[in-house]
Amino acid sequence: MATDDAVRGCTGVLVIGTRGSAGPGEVLVRIRGGSETFLAWSDVPLPKGTSVLVIDCRGARQVDVVEWADPLNALAGEAGNAG
C-alpha cells in the first residue's frame, strides 16, 4: 500500500471524532494548496473539533494523529494577556 508522506507533519481538525482503538475518525488537513480528508486513528478518543498533528501515514488515506496545540497561538494568547 502506498503511503502519502506529504501529509506527515501537517496539522488538521477532526471533523469526526476518533474512538481510540475502537475505530477511526476523520481529519481535514490543509495540504497541497487545498484541503483533504483522511481517516484518522489515535491512541485515545479525541472529540470532533480537536486540532491534531499527523504523526504517521498508514497508506490508503489513513493517518495516525495526536492532539496538537499550536505553540504560536499559545504565545499570541500570552502576549494578549500581558499588560
Image (cartoon, rainbow, N blue to C red):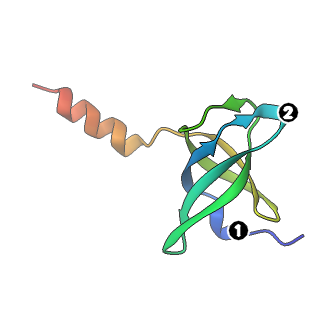
Q: Quadrant of the C terminus?
A: top left
Local secondary structure at mark 1? helix
> Is residue 29 shown left or right of residue 4?
left
The quadrant holding residue 7 is bottom right
Expressed as whole percent of the image width and height from the top left, the position of residue 47 reads 62, 32
First-in-chain label (1 vs 2): 1
Q: Quadrant of the N terminus?
A: bottom right
Type of the residue with mark 1: Asp
Q: Residue at x 76, y 33 (%)?
A: 19
Q: Residue at x 73, y 69 (%)?
A: 4
Expressed as whole percent of the image width and height from the top left, the position of residue 28 reads 58, 55
Instruction: Say which residue label 2 marks.
Output: 22
Type of the residue with mark 2: Ala
> Closer to the observer: label 1 or label 2?
2
For the residue pair 14 and 74, the one nearer the viewer reads as 14
Considering every residue shown, the one lying at the far front of the view is 16
